Image: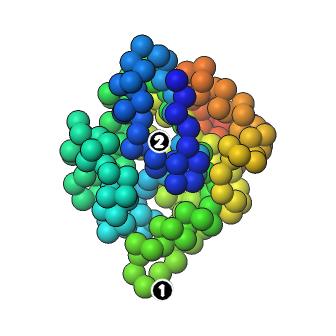
């Protein structure tokens, strides 16, 4: 069972995977969050906006077994929560390093006039990757575009096509693709 979501559907995968996993408890489980990252760094995802995101996605109902995720700055712990709760599942997070849509969206939680720069956004994504459990892979690409699944399924970053990366997720072998490293990091 693959749960995939793009744009606002990216965080939607993070709030709904638990219900899908429980419904299809005998299935092999996979998640692909296409361009909807949750960041650890407050300069990219403010605690104020996290509260609104939790409310928007009805977080306490969607994740009733994880009330610890709704403490200040704890929501990005959802990555580890799923890796621990579903040790046989495989997960993926994809994003453009300068995604203009999410930079603007996450800018709503910042002080008036503050803008999330491409550099801050890319650093936030790489910080997420550094903290992800082994069950997670990442596909990062240069540019300010938004989403891969609808129109960019064959998009290539660091020599790897997005569809090949997804195939690795579905094979249970998540990898990290990042043009900033000029290499693909093998399955962890």
Mark 2 burial class by Cα count in 10 Å: few <14, some 14-19, many 20+? many
Instruction: Name which residue lies at 43% across and 85% down.
Output: 112
Mark 1–mark 2 contact, CB under 8 Å?
no
Task: List the single residue furthest toward the top.
Answer: 26
Task: List the single residue furthest toward the bottom.
Answer: 113
Instruction: Name which residue lies at 63% across and 48% down.
Output: 140
| Element under disc 1 | loop
Between the C-alphas of marks 1 and 2, the distance is 30 Å
Asked if residue 150 lies left or right of residue 86, the reply is right
| Element under disc 2 | helix
Tally of numbered tags = 2
Instruction: State the residue position of label 1.
Output: 113
Q: On residue 13, which mark appears? A: 2
User: Can you give x and y, in whole percent of width and height, for residue 27 in the image?
Assistant: 47, 16
Asked if residue 181 lies left or right of residue 14, the reply is right
Comes first in the chain, label 1 or label 2? 2
Where 42 sits versus 57, above or below? below
Where 21 sits versus 98, above or below? above
Judged by depth in the image, the label closer to the viewer, 1 or 2, is 2
Asked if one can make out residue 125 in the rendered structure from this viewpoint, the answer is no
Mark 1 burial class by Cα count in 10 Å: few <14, some 14-19, many 20+? few
User: Can you give x and y, in whole percent of width and height, for residue 84 in the image?
Assistant: 33, 29
Where 86 sits versus 67, above or below? above
Q: On residue 6, which mark appears? A: none
């Amino acid at each position: 069972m693959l749960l995939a979501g793009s744009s606002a559907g990216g965080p939607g995968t993070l709030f709904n995977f638990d219900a899908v996993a429980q419904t299809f408890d005998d299935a092999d489980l996979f998640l692909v969050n296409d361009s909807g990252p949750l960041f650890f760094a407050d300069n990219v995802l403010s605690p104020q906006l996290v509260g609104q995101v939790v409310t928007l996605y009805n977080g306490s109902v969607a994740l009733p077994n994880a009330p610890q995720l709704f403490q200040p700055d704890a929501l990005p712990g959802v990555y580890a929560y799923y890796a621990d709760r579903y040790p046989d599942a495989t997960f993926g997070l994809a994003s453009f390093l300068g995604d203009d849509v999410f930079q603007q969206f996450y800018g709503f939680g910042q002080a008036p006039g503050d803008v999330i720069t491409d550099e801050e956004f890319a650093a936030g994504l790489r910080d997420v990757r550094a903290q992800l459990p082994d069950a997670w892979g990442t596909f990062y690409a240069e540019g300010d575009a938004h989403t891969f699944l609808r129109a960019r399924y064959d998009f290539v970053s660091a020599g790897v096509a997005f569809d090949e990366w997804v195939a690795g997720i579905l094979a249970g072998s998540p990898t990290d693709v990042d043009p900033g490293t000029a290499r693909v990091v093998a399955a962890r």
